[in-house]
């Protein structure tokens, strides 16, 4: 049987290693997830089954190594919840960049309109000075205006 002090050292090393991994993932971010698949589709059921199997294996291995049911339950719960806990930093940064770009573009649009130009003429004039994060959406808006889509409909499409 492994002495308790050895198990505690192993557990402490695993916790420190996990903390370092979490720190690196948090600083670098992760790729945004693809759009969610409906919950009843075969792809989502396969992913859920795979996560459950991984969580069970992690729980059983933890129980065999430590003989602590609480640690096994905690490790299994963490393995099951890890994708939700670790993802999303990069998507958050992209959303923030889009929001900041939209705010800067709106200010630019306001300044252009202040020069006695109508809104339909000011939008195409300000697209090329907009932030790269929102330029594709603004170009689509300009294209809609160019083919004579009514302004309220085109703006709803931008929203």
Image (cartoon, grey):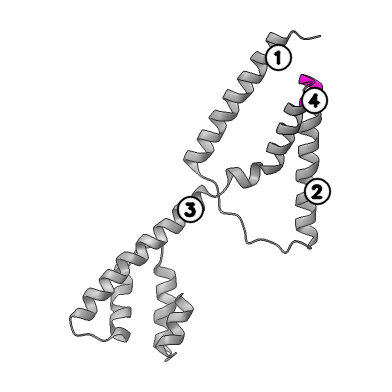
Residue at the image point whose x is 25% and y is 75% from the top: 110
Q: Which residue is mark 3?
A: 92
Distance between the Cα atoms at labels 1 and 4?
Answer: 12 Å
Instruction: Please give left or right for residue 148 compared with residue 115 in the image.
Output: right
Q: Which residue is mark 4?
A: 63
What secondary structure is marked by label 4? helix
Total residue callouts: 4
Distance between the Cα atoms at labels 3 and 4?
Answer: 36 Å
Image spot of residue 84 (x, y percent): 63, 47
Work out whether mark 3 precedes mark 2 in sequence or the reverse, and give the earlier one. 2
Q: Which residue is mark 1?
A: 7
Numbered range of the magenta stretch: 62-67
Residue at the image point whose x is 74% and y is 35% from the top: 76
Residue at the image point whose x is 78% and y is 62% from the top: 41
Work out whether mark 1 precedes mark 4 in sequence or the reverse, and give the earlier one. 1
Q: Which residue is mark 2?
A: 49
Query: Is label 3 in contact with label 4 (beta carbons under 8 Å)?
Result: no
Distance between the Cα atoms at labels 1 and 3?
Answer: 38 Å
Check if residue 99 falls in the magenta segment. no
* Frontmost residue, 145 versus 9: 9
Distance between the Cα atoms at labels 2 and 4?
Answer: 21 Å
Please name which of the two marks, 3 or 4, marks the residue nearer to the observer. 4
Distance between the Cα atoms at labels 3 and 2?
Answer: 28 Å
């Amino acid at each position: 049987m492994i002495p308790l002090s050895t198990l505690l050292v192993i557990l402490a090393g695993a916790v420190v290693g996990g903390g370092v991994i979490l720190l690196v993932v948090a600083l670098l971010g992760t790729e945004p997830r693809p759009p969610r698949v409906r919950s009843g589709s075969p792809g989502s059921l396969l992913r859920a089954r795979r996560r459950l199997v991984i969580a069970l294996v992690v729980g059983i291995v933890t129980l065999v190594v430590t003989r602590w049911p609480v640690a096994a339950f905690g490790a299994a719960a963490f393995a099951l919840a890890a994708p939700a806990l670790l993802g999303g930093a990069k998507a958050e940064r992209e959303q923030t960049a889009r929001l900041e770009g939209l705010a800067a573009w709106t200010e630019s649009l306001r300044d252009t309109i202040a020069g006695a130009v109508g809104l339909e003429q000011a939008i195409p004039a300000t697209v090329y000075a907009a932030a790269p994060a929102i330029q594709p959406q603004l170009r689509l808006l300009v294209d809609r205006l160019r083919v004579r889509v009514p302004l309220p409909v085109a703006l709803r499409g931008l929203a």
